[in-house]
Amino acid sequence: MDLGEAWARVLAGLPPNQRAWLTNSRPVTLHESTAIVAVPDDFTRGQLETRLRPDLERILTESFGRDIRIAVTVDPSLDPELREPQAPPQPVVREPLRTDGAFQPTIQSALTDPDTTGQQFRQPPNQGIGQQPPAHHSGQRFDQPAGQQYTTQQPQQFGAPQQQPQQFGQPLPNGSAPAQPATEAQGEARLNPKYTFETFVIGSSNRFAHAAAVAVAEAPGKAYNPQLIYGDSGLGKTHLLHAIGHYVRSLYTGARVRYVSSEEFTNDFINAIRDDKASQFQRRYRDVDVLLIDDIQFLEGKIQTQEEFFHTFNTLHNANKQIVISSDRAPKRLEALEDRLRNRFEWGLITDIQPPDLETRIAILRKKAATERLTAPPEVLEFIASKVQTNIRELEGALIRVTAFASLNRQPVDLSLAEIVLKDLIPEGSKPEVTASMIMGQTASYFGLSIDDLCGSSRSRVLVTARQIAMYLCRELTDLSLPKIGQQFGGRDHTTVMHAERKIRQLMSERRSVFNQVTELTNRIKHQAKQQ
Ligand SMILES: Nc1ncnc2c1ncn2[C@@H]1O[C@H](COP(=O)(O)OP(=O)(O)OP(=O)(O)O)[C@@H](O)[C@H]1O
């Protein structure tokens, strides 16, 4: 059965008062267990997401013989009143600019063979894994050099009236400059300039999440709301959240975008209560057009913060503002989160990211090497990609180690050198768990310091380096988030951890002593983890 047939059963199976809501709706596509349905306006979407959802999902589940959930997207062109009665004949354009929100073709064309009717997502032929989606993707070409896609020459005004879809950002000709300087984008929105769609490598493991993220950025508040991206640590969730933020800001002038980890949200909330600044806090998170909230699992068990986030969510959702959430688990498995929050997450589109396959890992390394100006021949990239399989952060870390070692020794990067540097990498799967306290303990004893020294405020040179190495290793060897690592080191801010990571990466290729210290410590820590 295809989605069209199943949808006919839905229409036949509903009572007339419910069926009326579906008059101008359209089933778009089925991806795994998610049926995407387009409706003409936000009000209808609200009805489908709440009142009609149980019946729709029941009939679809019966039709397909497996659990199906719906994700509802707004496509204003489905509104009969907005259709042009007699559109003048148009010349045939191979890659038309979309003016109606652009989200369904985006997600569909990114995932389907252009020659099929698009009822099933599947990998397009001729498309190498790890490459960009087809050129017709949302009317833009994807074979342009990095930095030239996803940008517009004249960003559109944000908050255009809903019935005027042509006001939404239209991807404009290629090669145009970003609408806003990176510094501004980094400021209020707090976005990492490196995490953009251009630097994100697409493979079968993340294609759906990526396509949905592009769709959401092109039509914030309309395409899918909320979008939830889940997957294991280091697979690119944060990267996608930031990429959405950048792209929205380049498409819509004045769009208010805010990225926050849920730990920061929690701390901010606690401080606001303490300092009696609740209304300031609320303005910060509610007066935005796009809220990107990372690692939502940290809200588990935090009742008051969940309550506050629930209201933030409702305020934004009611005002058709976009919410994008990341989590390390599917919402169903966020057991210590209140039902009403979990339930709201299910209103939108849930997308997962899986560990990348070998070709995608190689493509990621190739891109990383190009952006960081690291030189490594293909066989070395393949070797690294075959050694590190489940965490992209570790994959990048391995590349940095190999190239840093080569530069220190003034040797070319080749296979034998890579084998030497990575010989101690323990095969994944049997990977023992490394904890922050192990790293801190080993680092402290290696440098003849105490844990208190690492957590304290002394800025002597040895101490600063030791502290930064320990933070770097926490980043590389554990799944801890930046704020969590900051907390371990005497409640430091997450930006301090980011700085430490950058600093040590740099020092490793400049100072042999630092490279040796990091390597030696890694071995000791992994050895200890194996013993336990
Ligand atoms: N598909 C990809 N293409 C290019 N780089 C990627 C991709 N996926 C992840 N990365 C890189 O891998 C690193 C880790 O990614 P990121 O921090 O987004 O992971 P995460 O899923 O948010 O992890 P965590 O749950 O631990 O926060 C980043 O440097 C990111 O740029």
Image (cartoon, rainbow, N blue to C red):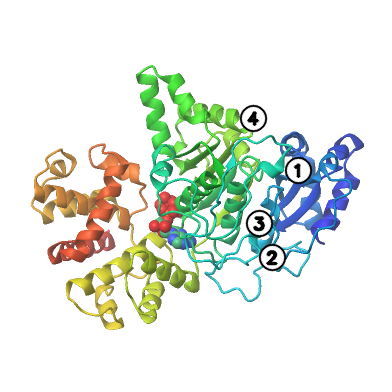
Taking the image as shown, residue 104 lies to the left or right of residue 206, namely: right
Q: Is residue 19 above or below residue 431?
A: above
Q: Which residue is mark 2?
A: 112
Ligand 1 in which quarter: bottom left
Amino acid at dot 4: Asn
In terms of sequence position, does the residue under pointer 2 or pointer 4 come before the other? 2
Q: Position of residue 310 (x, y in %)?
A: 55, 30
Amino acid at dot 1: Pro
Amino acid at dot 3: Thr
Which quadrant is home to the C terminus?
A: bottom left
Q: In the image, what residue occupies the spot 74% across and 45% down?
A: 75
Amino acid at dot 2: Thr
**Label drawn at residue 57:** none
Q: Which residue is mark 4?
A: 318
Q: Is residue 513 above or below residue 436?
A: below
In terms of sequence position, does the residue under pointer 3 or pointer 1 come before the other? 1
In terms of sequence position, does the residue under pointer 3 or pointer 4 come before the other? 3
SS under mark 4: helix
- Label 4 Cα neighbours within 10 Å, binned few <14 / some 14-19 / many ≥20: few
Q: Position of residue 472 (x, y in %)?
A: 26, 54
Q: In the image, what residue occupies the spot 52% across and 33% down?
A: 288
Q: Can you tell which of label 4 and label 1 is closer to the viewer? A: 1
Q: In the image, what residue occupies the spot 61% across and 53% down?
A: 171
Q: Which residue is mark 1?
A: 76
Which quadrant is home to the N terminus?
A: bottom right
Q: Which residue is mark 3?
A: 106
Q: Can you tell which of label 2 and label 1 is closer to the viewer? A: 1
Disc 4 from disc 1: Cα separation: 18 Å
Q: Quadrant of residue 408?
A: bottom left
Identify which residue, 22 or 80, lies in the foreground.
80
Query: Can residue 380 be spotted in the picture?
Result: yes
Query: Can residue 306 be spotted in the picture?
Result: no
